[in-house]
Image (cartoon, coloured by chain):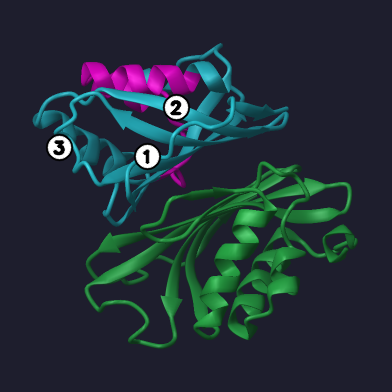
Chain colours: A green, B cyan
Amino acid sequence: MSAKKQLNGSADEVEAAFYAAISRGDLDALMALWAEDEEIVCVHPNSPRLIGHAEIRASWEAIFDNGSVHIHVQQVHAIHNLASAIHSVIEEFHQKDAIAQDVHIIATNIYVKTPRGWRIAMHHASVATGQAPRDLFKNNVLH
Amino acid sequence: MSAKKQLNGSADEVEAAFYAAISRGDLDALMALWAEDEEIVCVHPNSPRLIGHAEIRASWEAIFDNGSVHIHVQQVHAIHNLASAIHSVIEEFHQKDAIAQDVHIIATNIYVKTPRGWRIAMHHASVATGQAPRDLFKNNVLH
């Protein structure tokens, strides 16, 4: 089972792999990045909360049935410690018609360090009214 | 400055104090629960991301200007480690007219252990379509 693979990347690399898998529509690669724990949580914009591998996998499968999604992550604000990494990001969609022009997507991505490496524990994405704020400040990353 | 007080409660107690302060409309008590870090993040439903004490305080002040908000938290799914606690919750509003009947609010609340005790690092609340799911399972809390 691919989810049992050892991953050696940092939380940042897992985040990059997460959005890369989404852009390829690669369901197995995407799901292998999540913690094996059945308490993992995924919230898609405007959608109910999903808990556990089966629900989360089915949701991404349905998304990929409509084609892959190209997301560029920007304005990362992060809090890292030895066991967890918490990222607040703005998700920028490359297909400009993928979402309405007068909204943007905010995501909270949470990574935990497991015996098999850094994995995704929660992904919470939601819609905010208005265009994405311009990045007035340089990216601030706390360690 | 009240934010510098030592807090001795657990992350669960900080969460209870957070919603209690909201229900009282107590801005100072609410803000004292946040980490002193300027990287703290707050996302209100449908709203842009707020970063830092000044923006977050102003947003709650505007909310409280319209009266306090009584929220009951249910269906907590949590991942705890020594330095952070991550809670996914459904926010149930006591005033039934506070939100539309065909939506519900999902929140991700993140607490970090600081030298002054457990504090809120991020609060991300968002709207989900449909009524809140019924709690089919007992609360699952991972430690």
- Amino acid type assigned to the residue bearing label 1 in the image: Ala
The answer to whether residue A101 is above or below residue B4 is below
**Location of mark 2 (residue):** B74
Q: Main secondary structure of the magenta part?
A: helix
- Amino acid type assigned to the residue bearing label 2 in the image: Gln
Report x, y in % for residue A43. 49, 54
**Label 2 is found on which chain of the structure?**
B
**Location of mark 1 (residue):** B132
* Crowding at mark 3 (Cα within 10 Å: few <14, some 14-19, many 20+): few
Residue under disc 1 on the same chain as residue under disc 3? yes
Residue under disc 2 on the same chain as residue under disc 1? yes
Report x, y in % for residue A65. 55, 81
Q: Camera-side residue: B75 or B67?
A: B75
The answer to whether residue B67 is above or below residue A98 is above
Report x, y in % for residue A83. 75, 42
What stretch of residues is rendered in magenta?
A: B14-41
* Crowding at mark 2 (Cα within 10 Å: few <14, some 14-19, many 20+): some
A38 displayed left or right of B105: right
- What is the residue that sits farthest to the top in this orientation? B8
- Amino acid type assigned to the residue bearing label 3 in the image: Ala
Q: Residue at point 71% right, 64% down?
A: A31
Q: Residue at point 38% right, 66% down?
A: A105
Report x, y in % for residue A48. 43, 51
User: What is the CA distance from the residue labelled 1 to the residue labelled 3?
Assistant: 26 Å
**Location of mark 3 (residue):** B62
A76 displayed left or right of B24: right
Q: Which element is circle 2 on?
A: strand
Q: Is residue B142 a member of the stretch shown in magenta?
A: no
Q: Is residue B25 a member of the stretch shown in magenta?
A: yes
> Which quarter shows the C terminus of chain B?
top right
Q: Which element is circle 1 on?
A: loop
Q: Are marks 2 and 1 in contact (CB under 8 Å)?
A: yes
